[in-house]
Amino acid sequence: MVEKKNDFIEVLRFAWKWKLYLGGISLFAAILAAIFSGPKFITPKFESYVIFYPTTQMSVSKGLLSENSYGDDDFLTVGEGEEAEQLLQILQSDMIGNKIKKRYNLMEHYGIKPDEKYANTKFGIKFHKNVKSQLTEYTSIKVSVRDEDPVMAANIANDIVEIMDTIRNNILKARAIHGMKIVEKDYKEKKAYVQSIVDSLNALAKLGVLDFEGQSDALSQAYAESVSRGNSAVLRTIDDKLAVLSEFGPTQAWLSGELEYELEEVVKLRTKYKQIKADVESIVPNKFIIERAGVPERKAFPRRSIITIVAFFSALLFSIILFVFIENFKQIKKK
């Protein structure tokens, strides 16, 4: 206990002995930090950000037009980690940077000449230094933008999210258009095939073949009645009809069954075509925006107060170490 007390007194003695030097050096460092972190030496930047949740990765046709819509996979539910990571890939892609660069003339704004060496590389480094996209602890996405102009920072942040939405919709739409062409081709081919069956059935109907099974039963019964009555004229007529029926009846029966099946397929393809067409023509947001970017009122960088405090205590610590070394060096030299 005595040793601890003596150590504390020794520390106080040391601090009192060098108080002017410790205070002077620390205060001088703090003043320098405050001066050199000012707007004359470091251009202040403002930060604005957007926070949003991704939507579920579900097409309009599946989410709204299918029979199972609003089931386990709800069109209005918030997306999870996988959806957020996919949107982050788009946010961090060069497509976003290039569109923002053209829209706001950022090359000139960042002081980069388009014809200078490695201009695009320099722009990319500076853009990704000022624009950050990251997942929050609540699985939402935060897009933050730093810029010398607070209004531009807010506008860029909002536009980045909208451009991301457009890019993702274009990617999905391109895929949907490809699928729609395939379905449309199958649908047209199926309709043409159905029409050929209908034409064949109409041709058979002109020959008197309308219903193979029904006509067979009816003609067989009429034939039997005519035989019992001995009506030879009617028998000859029935024989002619039975000959035509026996020749074309099986074809008519097969075509009727084929038509029933193919009509069901046409209905399915038509439904699928309508659904995928809805995906092509629809523009659905891929985000639930929680907080839009507003114009910041205070600068985010540099934080002069923090820099000054850190400089003060860093200089104080360095001074203590320096003077401890000086005292120990004197003692060693005396010995």
Image: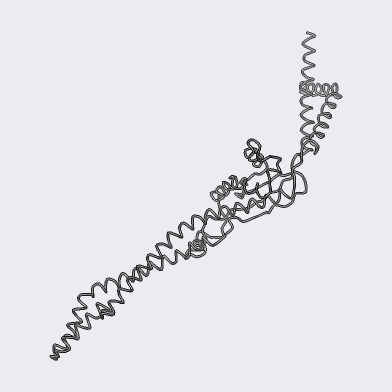
**Measured along the vertical axis of the image, is residue 163 above or below residue 196?**
above
The quadrant of the rendering that contains the N terminus is top right
Scheme of image coloration: one colour
- Residue 171 coordinates in the image, percent (x, y): 53, 53
The answer to whether 111 appears left or right of 214 in the picture is right
Identify the image quadrant of residue 46: top right
Q: Residue at x 55, y 48 (%)?
A: 86
Q: How many marks?
A: 0
Query: Would residue 300 be found to the left or right of residue 189 on screen?
Result: right
Image height check: is 70 above or below 205? above
45 left or right, relative to 274: right
Query: Residue 55 or 99: which is nearer the viewer?
Result: 99
Rendered location of residue 255, percent (x, y): 29, 71
Measured as percent of width and height from the top left, residue 88 is found at: 58, 47
**As drawn, is 68 to the left or to the right of 256?**
right
Quadrant where the C terminus is found in the figure: top right
Residue at screen point 57% across, 49% down: 87
Q: Is residue 22 above or below residue 36?
A: above
State the residue lying farthest toward the top: 335
Q: Position of residue 2 (x, y in %)?
A: 78, 21
